Image (cartoon, helix red, strand yellow):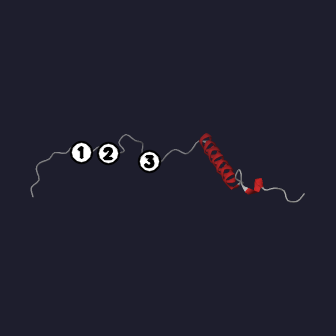
Amino acid sequence: MDQPNVVTKPREPWNKGKLVGQKAPFKLKEIWAIRIRLRLGRERTFARGHAALGPRPGSSSTTRPDLHR
């Protein structure tokens, strides 16, 4: 069970040269940018939900004749 003498070079750390530690807090400009993106996203999903729940083109409710004259 002798293994041949294989010389391996030491591995380079995956985070070599990267900043480590705690990140800086958000700036006020970045906070407002996030808020606006979240608000726009909610409005889009809200509008998409209402479009999906609305009447379909050609459905019976839009083409039904008026029976009470």
Disc 1 residue type (three-letter): Pro
Which residue is under mark 1?
A: 10
Give the crowd class for mark 3: few <14, some 14-19, many >=20 residues within 10 Å. few
> CA separation, marks 3 and 2?
16 Å
Which residue is under mark 3?
A: 21
Q: Is residue 26 left or right of residue 44?
A: left
> CA separation, marks 1 and 3?
24 Å
The mark found on residue 13 in the picture is 2
Residue 3 in the image: state x and y as whole percent: 11, 53
Question: Is residue 62 positioned above or below 19 on the image?
Answer: below
> CA separation, marks 2 and 1?
9 Å
Disc number lying in front (3 or 2): 2
Residue 68 in the image: state x and y as whole percent: 88, 59
Marks 2,1: beta carbons within 8 A: no
Marks 3,2: beta carbons within 8 A: no
**Residue 33 appears in which quarter of the rendering?**
top right
Say which residue appears at 29% left-offset and 43% top-offset: 12
Give the crowd class for mark 2: few <14, some 14-19, many >=20 residues within 10 Å. few
Say which residue appears at 19% left-offset and 45% top-offset: 8
Disc 2 residue type (three-letter): Pro
